[in-house]
Image (spheres, coloured by chain):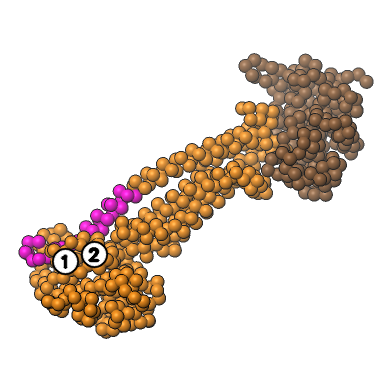
Amino acid sequence: MLMLIWKNISRRRTQSTLTVTITMLTVLVFVMVLGVFQTVNQGLALSEERLGADAVLVPKYAAAKGEDLLFTAIPENIYMPIEMVEEVKQFEGIAAMTPQFYCQTLALSCCEPGEEARIIGYDPATDFILKPHLDEKYQNGISPDELIVGRNFEDDNLVGSNYLVLSKKFNVVTALPPTGAGMDGTLFMDFRTAQDMCLESEVLAESWTTRDPHDYISVIMVKFESGVDGEEFAKQVEASGLEIKCLLTGDTISTLQSQLEVTMKVMFALWLASLLIAVLALVGRFNALAKERKKEIGLLRAIGLKKGQVFGLIIGETCTMALMGGVLGSALALLAMNPIIEMLKDAFKLSPSVWTSSLALLCGLAGIVLAAVLGFAAAVAPALKSASMDPQAAITQGEVN
Amino acid sequence: MEICKLEHIRKDYRMGEVVTPLKDVSLVVNKGDFIAVEGPSGIGKSTLLYVMGTLLQSDEGSYTFEGRDVAKFGDDEKSELRAKKVGFLFQDSTMIQALTLRENLLFTQGVGGKKDPKMVDELLYRFGLEDRADFFPHQLSGGQRRRAMAARALIHDPVLILADEPTNDLDEHWSEEIIRVLKEQTEKGTAVVMVTHNSRWAQEATRRCRLEDGVLVDIAE
């Protein structure tokens, strides 16, 4: 019986190719939609969990949006006086706060990041953002020639090696785990070192001719005491009259999530439409095949095949073809996922690093299961009809009915 | 020794009006019988074979196969009986399109629970099809398909062969050969019921009957 299933598939090549292709395209779209949804959603959840800060205080003039600051590693050269740290300490509801100093690399030569990358100088004394991800020996800080890199740099196996940043040699001591946020594409160094870099680098120094970077910070990351309402805190900041504004990470994530939901609903609706078309096409195909093979099915019954065997034969053929389409569709979708996530990265402000092999496996398996269900659902009615055909009528009437 | 027995079989077709090709058919088929059923086209000869092959259920009368009442058989039992005991040679040369000739024969044999590739080769040789063994049905001529059908009817060593116009599409030589093979089968104990409207081939049978107005009557020697 298995031999007949395989021969029917392999020797009716045009018919089989068509069926496999329809299933493959349906599964391809499904796995891609599922993969993107899962990646973006998990990225957001991971970011929320790992960002550590509930709010980011930035200079009032900063044009940067919350999602740009949090979810991209695009350099943001924004500064406010270092005295702002003392002012902010006066606010109510702060459990922890830490200043950060931003500067950037340039698109320069070898041994440096190929593109402009964000450098963040962090303050080990107050930091609560990096600390949970660092080994104990780095929790009290790193030396001026040491560097911590985001997960995206880990692909280059930088840990333990030397790395040039703005022509200065650094020893990469560790890489952070993936966060799905801008941290993944950021280089972290000691706060003071980052400020020094602005004077040492010829290009960056041009921006600091009239002021001293040591008198400035870029942002203050804030963690609330439990029960503090973010909106209330933001009002407090605004009412203070200070030249700063409050970006709530929860709001940013919620905004991204609602944007994502709308996008995903549209994508899902489009996929449902394509699924419906695929089901109709497959039901039509299997019905036509059953009709075309009516005489043959009558013959199979006449030579002694039982109803269940005829049913199994047709379901076996269709499910095998559907599974082939499912495997191909899943494989193609998984191959296409990395470029797709790269393309969507900017749109969703997310890091592609959260597309893991376990997620890929899950999406791929879901695609294969969908293919099997699709094949079975589309073939079950024609298979039942064929199996219960009166063999004598099938033989004598053939395709006429 | 009795293989099957039809008693007062009636079969109606309801196609707008009721057509009754078999009104009162009785027939006993014994081991080694070669029975020819004659009659004009459309009289119900094929219907009789379908009833005997359990592909059709009669409306009245009783049909026993090897002493067992076929009316009491479930669908699976009927399938098993066809797979193991009955060899069909249909008027229509239907074959499994995705299988080669050899594969068609092997598959049919397998459904009957047998696996004898040597027998397949022997039958292919016997019917002059050895060089067509790996051809697909659509690559065979009408006559070759007919011979292939004959080989398929014998491939699982049935106790009863039901042959519907077995010499259709065949030239003189192969018609004679098919009849010779069927006769040889009866000598081995297989019963053959052959439907034909060609009295020349009917003469080869050990018993000749005519289906007239739904009743089977013996033709006197």
* Disc 1: which residue: A58
Numbered label tally: 2
Q: Position of residue A142 (x, y in %)?
A: 27, 82
| Chain part drawn in magenta | A238-264
Residue A353 left/right relative to A325: left
Residue A322 left/right relative to A249: right
- Please tell me the colour of chain A: orange
Q: Quadrant of the C terminus of chain A?
A: top right
Q: Position of residue A96 (x, y in %)?
A: 18, 71
- Is residue B27 visible to us here? yes
Residue drawn 53% across the image and 50% down it: A325
Q: Position of residue A294 (x, y in %)?
A: 64, 34
Q: Quadrant of residue A162?
A: bottom left
* Disc 2: which residue: A69
Q: Are marks 1 and 2 in contact (CB under 8 Å)?
A: yes
- Please tell me the colour of chain B: brown
Which sits in the foreground, B199 or B134?
B134
Q: Position of residue A298 (x, y in %)?
A: 67, 34
Main SS of the magenta part reads: helix
For mark 1, name the chain: A
Residue A96 left/right relative to A309: left
